[in-house]
Image (tube, grey):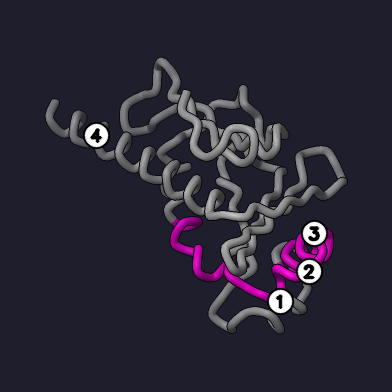
């Protein structure tokens, strides 16, 4: 089991299954945010898929920096993004550029274990606001982190999965 980030604050937990099927990288993935487990820690997923999804999340870092959205309450921030992603809401587009998307604020790694959970982040001046809603719970939770822990955690998890996948591809090609 690998833990990326700070275990008691914000982390991504990744465990490669004993029978991980080479480059498919079968395993487990979930978040721990202030001791709240986000995702199903018993649900096996393709960590290869998680790697490609994380790549996109890491690349969107700059579009998650927004002073106006950062200043919103947790509920307003969450609902603004939800409405733009899943409703007909256009309000978000008064805060972001025309080539940016609501989904860029999502830091949920969209694999089977994370479905029906929502996690969004926005940053401003070395602070990151994270809002989330756990599967089956209507309450919206939010926290502010006062360093780069969120982006560093995402990057470290991405690099780990990238290295694992590349190693397995090389092993498979050399057989």
- Kindly report which numbered mark, 3 or 4, lies closer to the viewer in this rendering: 3
As helix, strand or loop, the secondary structure at mark 2 comes to loop
The residue under the point 59% across, 34% down is: 30
Q: Which residue is mark 2?
A: 72
The range drawn in magenta is 56-84
| Spatial separation of the CA atoms under disc 4 and disc 1 | 42 Å
Q: Which residue is mark 1?
A: 68
| Spatial separation of the CA atoms under disc 3 and disc 4 | 40 Å
Q: Is the C-beta separation of discs 2 and 3 under 8 Å?
A: yes
Q: Position of residue 3 (x, y in %)?
A: 50, 31
Q: Specify whether residue 63 is painted magenta.
A: yes
Q: Give the crowd class for mark 4: few <14, some 14-19, many >=20 residues within 10 Å.
A: some
Most extreme residue toward the left is: 174
Which is more toward the observer, 175 or 104?
A: 104
As helix, strand or loop, the secondary structure at mark 4 comes to helix
> In the shown orientation, is residue 136 left or right of residue 69?
right
Q: Which residue is mark 3?
A: 74
The residue under the point 72% across, 43% down is: 116
51, above or below 62, in the image: above
> In the shown orientation, is residue 2 left or right of residue 98?
left
Q: Which residue is mark 4?
A: 167
């Amino acid at each position: 089991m690998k833990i990326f980030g700070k275990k008691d604050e914000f982390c991504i937990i990744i465990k490669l299954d004993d029978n991980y099927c080479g480059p498919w990288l079968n395993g487990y993935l979930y978040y721990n945010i202030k001791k709240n487990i986000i995702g199903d820690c018993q649900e096996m997923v393709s960590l290869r898929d998680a790697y490609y999804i994380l790549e996109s999340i890491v690349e969107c870092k700059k579009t998650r920096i927004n002073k106006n959205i950062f200043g919103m309450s947790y509920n307003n921030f969450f609902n603004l993004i939800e409405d733009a992603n899943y409703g007909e809401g256009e309000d978000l587009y008064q805060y972001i550029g025309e080539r940016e998307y609501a989904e860029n604020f999502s830091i949920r790694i969209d694999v089977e274990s994370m479905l029906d959970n929502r996690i969004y982040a926005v940053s401003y001046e070395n602070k990151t606001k994270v809002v989330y809603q756990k599967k089956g719970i209507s309450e919206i939770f939010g926290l502010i982190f006062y360093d780069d822990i969120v982006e560093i955690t995402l990057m470290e998890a991405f690099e780990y999965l990238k290295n694992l996948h590349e190693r397995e591809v090389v092993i498979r090609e050399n057989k």
